[in-house]
Image: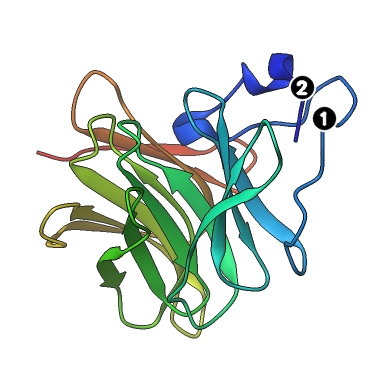
Amino acid sequence: WTSPAAAARRGPNGAVAAGPGPPRGKLQGTAGAVAAASFSLDGQRILSASDHRPARLWEVATGSEVMSFSGHSAQLMSAVFCEGESMVATVSRDGTARIWSLADAQGLRSLKLAGTTFSTATFSPRGEYILAAGQTGPYQRSTVCLWETETGKELHRIGNPDSVDGLAFSSSGPRVSGRALRTAVHAETRQLD
């Protein structure tokens, strides 16, 4: 994991960009490449998603695994904390976005969009919504989908011909933004009410 200074530069839901400083430790037991990792808001835990399931929760101080989240049937692409830290979400090439309880690692919801392989997800600031993006169909069109966290009800679906590599909720209201990879500067913001 990175130095505390790098951890302080967290993005949405604890995602950490690499920064200066030597590595502080190694998470033992992760098989395959790590696709994504994020710090909890207090910096005490790391959530990792790797080529080989399950997602894992680690204690920063010791580097030991605290719990794992099993249920996906293909490679994990992302794992994120909900800001209230009662839940985490994972997305996989199996076409599901899953919401898990941090209290006992039990699955709370499995969200699926037919024909979509999810690559990224994020929770709204208070955790009432989850947003996931992935590729849909034979032409790999990007789809961004918004669900209610508690019910799993789909609220909105947005299509985009470019690959979406980042999602964020606005802190000032129900708006979302997504970044596209193949467009030099592209951000799409949609009002969700």
Q: Which disc is residue 8 wearing?
A: none
Res. 106 visible in picture: yes
Q: Position of residue 136 (x, y in %)?
A: 43, 75
Of residues 120 and 99, the one nearer the viewer is 99
Report the number of numbered marks: 2
Counting from the top left corner in percent of width and height, residue 95 is at 42, 77
**Local SS, label 2:** loop
Q: Please, is residue 148 above or below residue 94 in the view? A: above
Q: Could you tell whether 22 is left or right of 87 in the image? A: right
Q: Residues within 10 Å of mark 2 (few under 14, many from 20)?
A: some
Above or below residue 105? Residue 24 is above
Q: Residue at x 62, y 16 (%)?
A: 8
Measured from the top left, where is residue 116 in percent x and y?
A: 41, 75
Q: What secondary structure is found at the residue carrying circle 1?
A: loop
Q: Amino acid at mark 1?
A: Arg
Kind of residue sitting beneath label 2? Ser
Mark 1 or mark 2: whose residue is earlier in sequence: 2
Disc 2: which residue:
3
Front-lying residue, 157 or 21: 21
Quarter containing the C terminus: top left
Q: Residue at x 31, y 82 (%)?
A: 114
- Kindly identify the residue that appears in the image at 32 percent across and 58 percent down: 99
Is residue 182 visible in the rendered image? The answer is no
Q: Is residue 91 left or right of residue 20?
A: left
Circle 1 crowding by C-alpha within 10 Å: few under 14, some 14–19, many from 20 = few
Q: Position of residue 41 (x, y in %)?
A: 47, 26
Q: Nearer the viewer, residue 5 or 141?
A: 5
Labels 1 & 2 near each other (Cβ < 8 A): yes
Extreme residue toward the right, this view: 22
Residue 177 drawn above or below residue 74: above
Spatial distance from mark 1 to mark 2, Cα to Cα? 6 Å
Q: Which residue is mark 1?
A: 24
